């Protein structure tokens, strides 16, 4: 086997190398390093590297300043979190919300009007809650069963104990009470039924128009409709105090009850061939108004005795639900009272 010279491949014990604490071993050949340094200093590529190094040195302070991490104390972080939580609560108006078992139970026992209730499954295991919730549901109060986490989201992390409710701005009455009230002092009363109108601003505007045109009451379904919230009351501008409202579990079933009591059911339908201006029937009447995008549901259309359209002469193809309700009430009340 061929022997390799130690001079060709210097090892650890070579005289030409000394131990370096950082990189192992280095050579003592000073002449060789001087030549290398002269070559590198005169190299154009090295000049570019030196220029880059100078630029890096100049920008070192701004770079460190830009990339310097910002550490906040736990106390400051918790304060920011609390302020953010309060800001969320302020954005969502909780003035008409109540949560917690004891607080909610006292409200349920009282006579304050309730718009909506959210509760977990555990609440139904309590007999006192179960009886009250069942009674309220029959009166048209919307009761929604949700998970604990969902209820925490709705209340923004409040200690809800599994139940929360939203108060209504006005009391509601049953459909039978509304029928009796409407016929008390009027031969041909007009009622208004809302089908799928979920925007509280629209509901508030409709209530205001209904009261202005002597409508005797409004029927709102339990689901797929805005409740009597603070926004509705504000937009209604006081009209809610002078108008009876019935919140029903099932709108179509209520329309059947109205028909049995002598009411004509009239639906506003944009594609109908019968114009509201040509409709001259005089009788107790309930006018059904649907949402602007979907209109009256197909099942509700089948419950209507007449479908009426509002003739439009411009290029606009449809009207806002509150505007359509106001126009139809003006036309129908004029015919009914003439």
Image (cartoon, helix red, strand yellow):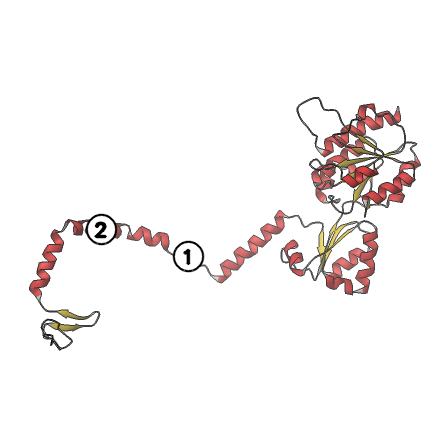
Q: Residue 254, image x and y in percent?
A: 85, 43
The crowding category of the residue bearing disc 2, from other C-alpha atoms within 10 Å (few below 14, some 14 to 19, many at least 20), is: few
Query: Vertical placement of 91 versus 211: above or below?
Result: below
Query: Vertical placement of 56 versus 309: above or below?
Result: below
Quadrant hosting residue 329: top right
Query: Vertical placement of 324 versus 234: above or below?
Result: above
Q: Residue 193, image x and y in percent?
A: 80, 38
Q: Residue 242, image x and y in percent?
A: 82, 38
Lateral position of residue 79 relative to residue 306, left or right: left
Residue 178: in sight, yes or no?
no
Secondary structure under the numbered disc 2 in the rendered image: helix
Q: Quickly name the residue at label 2.
A: 54
Residue 7: in sight, yes or no?
yes
Residue at 71% across, 49% down:
96
Quadrant including the C terminus: top right
Q: Quickly name the residue at label 1.
A: 70
Q: Residue 282, image x and y in percent?
A: 89, 28
Residue at 92% across, 34% down:
185
Q: Nearer the viewer, residue 273 or 260?
A: 273
Secondary structure under the numbered disc 1 in the rendered image: loop
Q: Nearer the viewer, residue 70 or 5?
A: 5
Quadrant hosting residue 299: top right
């Amino acid at each position: 086997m061929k022997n390799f010279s130690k001079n060709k491949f210097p090892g650890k014990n070579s005289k030409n190398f000394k131990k370096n604490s950082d990189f192992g071993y280095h050579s003592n050949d000073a002449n060789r390093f001087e030549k290398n340094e002269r070559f590198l200093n005169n190299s154009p590529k090295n000049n570019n590297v030196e220029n880059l190094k100078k630029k890096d040195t100049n920008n070192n302070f701004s770079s460190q300043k830009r990339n310097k991490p910002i550490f906040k104390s736990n106390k400051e972080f918790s304060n920011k979190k609390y302020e953010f939580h309060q800001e969320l609560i302020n954005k969502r108006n909780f003035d008409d919300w109540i949560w917690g078992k004891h607080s909610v139970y006292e409200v349920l026992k009282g006579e304050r009007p309730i718009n909506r209730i959210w509760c977990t499954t555990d609440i139904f295991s309590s007999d006192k809650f179960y009886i009250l919730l069942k009674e309220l549901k029959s009166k048209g109060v919307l009761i929604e069963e949700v998970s604990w986490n969902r209820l925490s989201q709705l209340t923004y992390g409040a200690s809800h104990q599994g139940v929360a409710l939203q108060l209504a701005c006005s009391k509601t009455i049953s459909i039978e009470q509304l029928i009796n009230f409407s016929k008390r002092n009027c031969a041909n009363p007009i009622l208004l039924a809302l089908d799928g109108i979920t925007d509280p601003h629209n509901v508030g505007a409709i209530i205001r128009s209904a009261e202005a045109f002597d409508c005797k009451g409004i029927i709102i379904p339990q689901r797929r409709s805005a409740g009597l919230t603070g926004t509705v009351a504000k937009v209604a501008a006081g009209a809610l105090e002078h108008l009876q409202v019935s919140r029903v579990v099932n709108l179509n079933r209520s329309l059947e009850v109205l028909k049995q009591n002598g009411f004509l059911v009239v639906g506003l339908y944009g594609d109908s061939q019968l114009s509201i201006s040509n409709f001259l029937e005089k009788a107790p009447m309930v006018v059904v108004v649907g949402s602007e995008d979907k209109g009256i549901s197909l099942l509700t259309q089948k419950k209507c005795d007449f479908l009426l359209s509002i003739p439009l002469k411009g290029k606009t193809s449809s009207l806002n639900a509150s505007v359509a309700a106001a126009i139809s009430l003006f036309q129908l009340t004029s015919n009914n009272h003439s």
